[in-house]
Amino acid sequence: MLFDIKISKELKEISKNVTLGCVKAKVDIEKSDENLLKEIERVINITKGIDIDEINELLQIKEIRNVYKSLGKDPSRYRASSESLLRRIIKDKGLYRINNIVDINNLLSISSFYSVGTYDIDKLKPPIIFTYGKDKDTYDAIGKGNINIENLPVFKDEIGYFGSPTSDSKRSMIKNETKNILMMIISFGDENVEKYLEYAKKLLVRYANAEDIEMKIVT
């Protein structure tokens, strides 16, 4: 069964429409194949048509920036991953190629403008709650070292914090030996989560041989 995943009362008070699209699956981690890379390039070419000054006015980006501001976090210093990916593309810096799961994660994000996080289930201890970091909370983030997650929206399990729309922790990161994943599509008000949940399933089946797929929307 899909993990017990909830959104904290405190975060709902900040964003009453916060929604998570959750996918659990058994997958094969491998190098992205040519068709997946072509699909990514197709979306990149579309995204390049966005003016960099328009990014913050995109509904999904605007909503998450407003939540960060409400929490007292500077959204230009602690950018949501969705915004960071769009900025990389528009500045013609491209996207990092890691493996099929990370590449699917990024494809979902640049297609939907949502921040998306994917985690190694076997490194997590449920229940999971989506909340925000408290006074002086930190964790070791992928490629960023120890980051301050105080007042950032964050995922937390019984071990501690492990992911946020800005940057995920090393503890639950996807590695070559990962077998089971939990993917989270994070929305703060838009109503297209179900659409992209289905797209996530399609991508995981096609490009990661996904099996034992379970999905749910958490509000």
Image: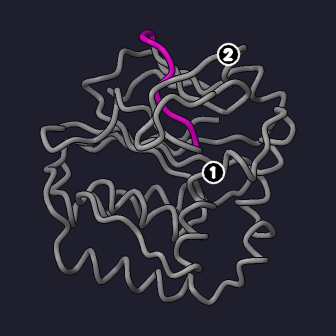
Q: Identify which residue is drawn at 62% across, 17% down.
A: 137
When asked about the image quadrant of residue 16, the answer is top right
Residue 151: in magenta span: no
The quarter of the picture where the C terminus appears is: top right
Dot 1: element: loop
Seen in the picture, residue 158 relative to 206 is either above or below; the reply is above
Residue 12 pos. (x, y %) = 77, 29
How many other residues sit within 10 Å of disc 1, few (<14), some (14-19) or many (≥20)? many
Q: What residue range appears in magenta?
A: 158-165
The residue lying furthest to the front in this view is 145
Q: Identify which residue is drawn at 22% across, 80% down.
A: 35
Disc 2 marks which residue?
A: 136
| Callout 1 amino acid | Ala
Residue 34 pos. (x, y %) = 18, 80
Image side of residue 56 versus residue 133, left or right:
right
| Callout 2 amino acid | Lys
How many other residues sit within 10 Å of disc 2, few (<14), some (14-19) or many (≥20)? few
Residue 19 pos. (x, y %) = 64, 42
When asked about the image quadrant of residue 180, the answer is top left
Disc 1 marks which residue?
A: 80
Q: Nearer the viewer, mark 1 or mark 2?
A: 2
Residue 163: in magenta span: yes
When asked about the image quadrant of residue 56, the answer is bottom right
Seen in the picture, residue 92 relative to 179 is either above or below; the reply is below
Q: Main secondary structure of the magenta part?
A: loop
